[in-house]
Amino acid sequence: MRTSLSVPDDVLSAFDETWRAQGLESRSRAVREAMAEYTEAHAQFEDVAGDIAAVLAFDYEHGSVVGDLHAIQHEFHEVINTTSHVHHDHWCLETVFCRGSAERVRDLAYRLRDFDAVGRVKVLSIRTR
């Protein structure tokens, strides 16, 4: 199947440099592998049930969404234990340490991804006993 997508020039250049350095034969192969890793990670995150401990790390453009992000964090206060925040010019890196229902932590991660001004949300989780 053929498809097309819009990618910023700097991201595409870095992606091309990476797959070539890894010795892959084509951009298509690299995109297929990246898509497979993305969907596998999503499936693993969706399959977790019960109580978990997790760290959500995300970067965002401070002025655009800081108020909205804080409001969301207040909505999920029962699973957020603590946060850490670092400024870097007009971008910020924030980590949110969570413990509680996997479903609530998942909902929080997905809500954080709702904003164009949020670059990435990375999740590291472990199931608690």
Image (cartoon, helix red, strand yellow):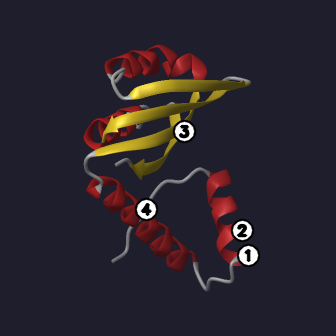
Query: Which three-letter amino acid code belongs to the residue tagged 1?
Result: Ala
Q: Nearer the viewer, mark 3 or mark 2?
A: 3
Identify the residue shown where x is 68% and y is 26%: 86
Q: Nearer the viewer, mark 4 or mark 2?
A: 4
> First in sequence: mark 4 or mark 2?
2
**Quick one: 76 or 19, which is closer to the camera?**
76
Residue 122 visible in the snapshot? yes
Q: Secondary structure at mark 2?
A: helix
Query: Which three-letter amino acid code belongs to the residue tagged 3?
Result: Ala
Q: Measured along the vertical axis of the image, is residue 102 above or below residue 32?
A: above
> First in sequence: mark 4 or mark 3?
4
Image location of residue 69, percent across then percent down: 45, 21
Query: Which three-letter amino acid code belongs to the residue tagged 2?
Result: Glu
> First in sequence: mark 4 or mark 1?
1
- Say which residue label 3 marks: 57
- Say which residue label 1 marks: 21
- Say which residue label 2 marks: 17
